[in-house]
Amino acid sequence: MHDVIMAPVIIFMLIVAPIWLVLHYRSKKQVSQGLSEEEYLQLSELSETADKMADRIKTLEAILDAETPDWRSKL
C-alpha cells in the first residue's frame, strides 16, 4: 500500500512540480513587467476607437432627439 502511494508522489515531485514552478514564476515575471510596446499600442488604438464610437453614439442620439423626441420612452 505504501509503494502504491509513493510512486505517484515521486512522479509528481520529479516531473510535474518543477514544470509547474517554472511556468508559475515565468507568468509572475511577465505580469510584473507590465504591458509590452505592442500591447500598449493596441490599447491606445482601442481607446481611440472607443472614443470615436462614443462620439458617434452622442451624434446619433442628438439626431434621434431632434427627429423623434420621445424615442427613449418607446424602448
Image (cartoon, rainbow, N blue to C red):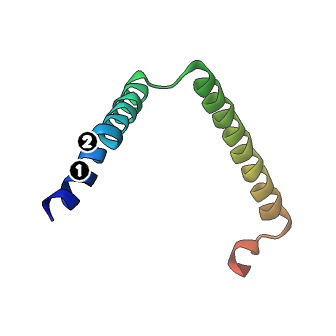
Q: Nearer the viewer, residue 71 or 27?
A: 27
Q: Nearer the viewer, residue 29 or 37?
A: 29
Q: Is residue 25 left or right of residue 6?
A: right
Name, please, the residue furthest toward the right. Answer: 67
Q: Nearer the viewer, residue 60 or 30?
A: 30
As helix, strand or loop, the secondary structure at mark 2 comes to helix
Percent coordinates x, y for residue 69 in the rendering: 77, 70
Percent coordinates x, y for residue 15 in the rendering: 35, 39
Q: How many marks?
A: 2
Q: Quadrant of residue 50?
A: top right
Residue neighbourhood size for the residue with mark 2, other residues' Cα within 10 Å, grouped as few (<14), some (14–19), many (≥20): few
Q: At 70% across and 72% down in the image, what residue appears?
A: 72
Residue neighbourhood size for the residue with mark 1, other residues' Cα within 10 Å, grouped as few (<14), some (14–19), many (≥20): few
Relative to 46, is 63 above or below?
below
Residue occupied by mark 2? 13
As helix, strand or loop, the secondary structure at mark 1 comes to helix
- Labelled disc at residue 9: 1
Relative to 37, is 24 above or below?
below
Percent coordinates x, y for residue 6 in the rendering: 19, 53
- As measured in the structure, the alpha-carbon distance from the residue carrying label 1 to the one carrying label 2 is 6 Å
Quadrant of the drawing holding the N terminus: bottom left
Name, please, the residue furthest toward the left. Answer: 2
Q: At 67% across and 39% down in the image, what residue appears?
A: 51
Identity, as a three-letter code, of the amino acid under mark 1: Val
The answer to whether marks 1 and 2 mark residues whose Cβ atoms lie closer than 8 Å is yes
Quadrant of the drawing holding the C terminus: bottom right
Q: Is residue 24 left or right of residue 73?
A: left
Q: At 77% across and 47% down in the image, what residue appears?
A: 56
Relative to 72, is 44 above or below?
above
Q: Is residue 2 left or right of residue 23?
A: left
- Labelled disc at residue 56: none
